Image (cartoon, rainbow, N blue to C red):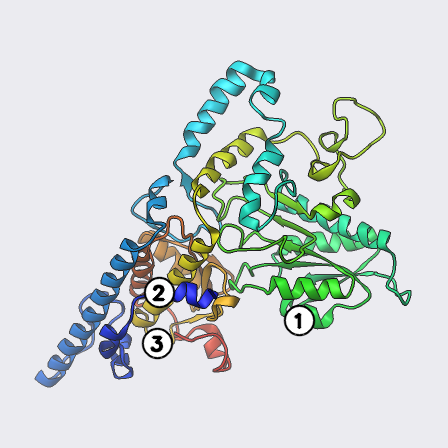
Amino acid sequence: MTDEEAGSEWLLTTERCGAVRAEGDNEVQQNESAGAGVPTERIDTPAEGGALIARTVAAAAVRDDLAARAAQLDAEDPLRGKRAEFVLDEAVYLDGNSLGALPQAVPERVREVVAREWGELRIRSWSESGWWTAPERIGDRIAPLLGAAPGQVVVGDSTSINVFKALVAAVRMADETGPAVDGVPRDEILVDAATFPTDGYIAQSVARLTGRTLRPVEAGKIPAEVSDRTAVALVNHVDYRSGRLNDLPRITAALHEAGALAVWDLCHSAGALPVGLDAHGVDLAVGCTYKYLNGGPGAPAYLYVRAEHQARFDSPLPGWNSHADPFGMNPEYVPAAGIERARVGTPDILSLLALEAALEVWEGVAVEDVRAKSLALSDFFLECVRAYVPRGRVRSVTPEPHDERGSQVALECAGAGEVMGELIRHGVIGDFRHPDVLRFGFTPLYTSFADAERAARVLAEVVAYVPGDGTASAVAAGAAEQGPTTM
């Protein structure tokens, strides 16, 4: 089943509301912002009053239809029971792409760790409570969500530190392999031109430290830009700003064909969609655990090292925890076998075990079902935005095709900072990226279709009074019609 089919099977037919959402009703959308209340236009004649009543009735019919569809979709949702496993309130929380909601199991587990394992067992917990093996044990719990077999994922350190370890190790592997067949040196690192800034900063530092040239390239153009000079490319699976899903299989295959290695940043994809690290031959990957994996603020990140590379993984940050004999206190470093050699220092146990408890919500969940609901949620949200928000007021920069979309919707909007502030004040929690992007993250384990409908409706109410020129900035700049959809 394709992504398009998986998402579409969630959605009911829209025929019964098509009549009231036809092109002839665009005037309703322009004058009636999401049913925000009584229209404010002046009524001079009985005929105008009658037309206004008709438009109001039509807008209410659209609103009622979408609300009813949301209720039915929620009733048919096979993941609906997972929502109860999170600590939520009356707000619509659409910022799980920045910080996931708190799973119900975490507070009690943290209390147990603090009171008993630390408070009573103390040092004995390194062995008796399994503290020492936590990085690999929890890595094996994350591995299925990444499409990875056991023994290839270790949890610890931050995403930034793991990016550094992965990139330097990849360059060292390239050095070990040697130049291309014709003697061309592998003296270049490619980096996703739209990467999250920290990834770019670290890539710059790695290039300086290893004597490489860093070349930013648009992710989709890497297959055409990679050359015999390329040692490694660092690519984001999902663009953090726009929500665009980059083609991991195609880009990885192109890098390998040129003899280069692939390092993928999975921060905005793991836990939201299938990744397929093993199936697609990814060399190394990193990611955070506090977004769709709901591990908590500052939760430790993870590092994936493909099994066939582990014997060659030469970490730039060797530590006592990655030593073959960590308690031997030998002055000479000998790396541990397997994924353990990617560890550095003492694990941050409280955060690690909070993450382990958070991962319990994934019991019995297939990531394919998560992907299907994610696509259905974002499709439905975009439909509601089109129905409620005045035409031209916002513009989606998230690709429409399912195979190009992650699990968020990004909307360009004049006055976006103030708009998001008002959305939050009215109980719809998303976030804002400079200069004019509203981001809405859809976490299928706890986001409902009713949430999506309410968010779009409140957005329409807010943009009706927040100052703006009536058009998103990119539209005003003359964006091409064949580009992202203008709402």
Disc 1/disc 3 C-alpha distance (Å):
33 Å
Residue 391 numbered tag: 3
| Distance (Cα) linking label 3 and label 2 | 17 Å
| 9 on left or right of 96 | left
Give percent across and percent down for residue 469. 39, 74
Q: Position of residue 197 (x, y in %)?
A: 63, 56
State if disc 3 and disc 1 touch (CB < 8 Å): no
User: Residue 32 falls in which quadrant of the image?
Assistant: bottom left
Query: 421 or 333, which lies in front?
Result: 333
Instruction: Report the residue marked by disc 1.
Output: 221
Q: Quadrant of the C terminus?
A: bottom left
Q: Position of residue 418 (x, y in %)?
A: 40, 60
Lower position in the chain sequence, tag 3 or tag 2:
2
Q: 39 and 121: which one is in front?
A: 121
**Residues under numbered marks 1 and 2 in contact, where contact means CB atoms less than 8 Å apart:** no
- The residue to which callout 2 is attached is 380
CA separation, marks 1 and 2? 31 Å
Give above or below for 249 relative to 392: above
| Mark 2: amino acid | Phe
Of marks 1 and 3, the one in the foreground: 1
